[in-house]
Image: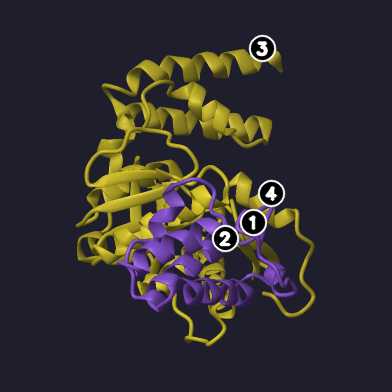
Amino acid sequence: MTSGAVENEVRDLLRSRAPLARGRDLLPDDLRLGPGGLGLDSISLVELLLECERRFGLRGVAGLLEGPPLTVGLLIAHLRTSAGR
Amino acid sequence: LSGARRVFDALEGGLAPLAGSWPRLAFSGAGAVGRLRNWLSRRWPSPEQVQTLFPRQGVDPVRPLVRAGADFGALRPPLVLGFFHVGAVQALGVAVERLPGPVLVLRQGSIHTPRPPVRVESTEGDGQRRAASFRRALDHLAEGGFVVMALDIVPGPGFRVPCLGRSIELARGPFALARIAGAPMRPLVARWQGGGVAAEAGEVIAAEAMPDREAWEEALAAEAARWLERYLLESPAELGLGLLRSLLADGFRTDGGS
């Protein structure tokens, strides 16, 4: 999968799962996934990352929760790197 | 009144040193003093009073008093055990030490140092920290463990479901955890009984699977509230002040809630 395809798929996934993302054409890289950004609650955050694991055939994506506040850019960068290996 | 309060404070203070060596005597005495005090004052003991009564000793004095039900040994992971703040909820930390497998307790803060096979995970913090705890609980279930968590403390999203003619708010997390992990859920309770604490697991909380994830979780939450209602109707003395306040804060239902 190309890096552009990963990016498009993640943005589509966010629009399908985060009500606050639905009406937005642009989802900037620095937009947070949780409160103050797309407003995903704790359970929705976990489900989003588990869905990424399923779609991209990856393990450990949910481990991003242990790091800094998750943003659109952080998630895309992680998936690009992991899917490209 | 202040004189009577001082007498009771002194009586309870005198019991505290006994808790380490003679826990059965100390807790029975505390029960008798508490009952007399409540009967006289018609008020409930507060958590602060409980802390004052047995300071610094945590749950150690309770440990020899806790009897896990025969069904405890038959419980098999992965299993989510959800508890309400009813009865001797403080003793559950000891009771789960008797579960036959690794135990992860999710709770806000930690009131005592857990013993193996129990590990405590804090659910304090922002949404991402709670999500990280939730993910670790999923991993724990996937590895074949027990996860223990409160149903009636709602740090994140929740459901308001009917109970005892009113409604209570239950946390969405435990039900989402059971759904995502595909693990069964059972309620967990403990009650003072004959100078000890009896802990037991209730029957499995189940609801027919639905395509709408949240609707399914809400149906599970409603089933859990129905279990609590049955339990409290059978054992009304187990209702604690916190849950009573929560129920009283909500208006009576007029749509057929029992």
What color was chain B assigned in the picture?
Answer: yellow
Q: Of the residues shown, which amino acid type is indicated by label 2?
A: Val
Residue at 52%, 71% in the rendered image? A7
- What type is the residue that disc 4 sits on? Arg
The amino acid pointed to by label 1 is Leu
Looking at the picture, does residue A43 appear above or below residue B246? below
Q: CA distance from mark 4 to mark 2?
A: 42 Å
Q: Are marks 4 and 2 on the same chain?
A: no
Cβ–Cβ under 8 Å for marks 1 and 2 = yes
Point out the image quarter for the N terminus of chain B.
top right
Q: Position of residue B199 (x, y in %)?
A: 34, 53
Tell me the amino acid under the disc marked 3: Gly
- Give the SS element for disc 2: helix
Quarter of the view holding residue B21? top left
Task: Please tell me the numbered disc located at residue B3.
Answer: 3
Query: Mark 4 against mark 2, which lies toward the viewer?
Result: 2
Give the colour of chain A.
purple
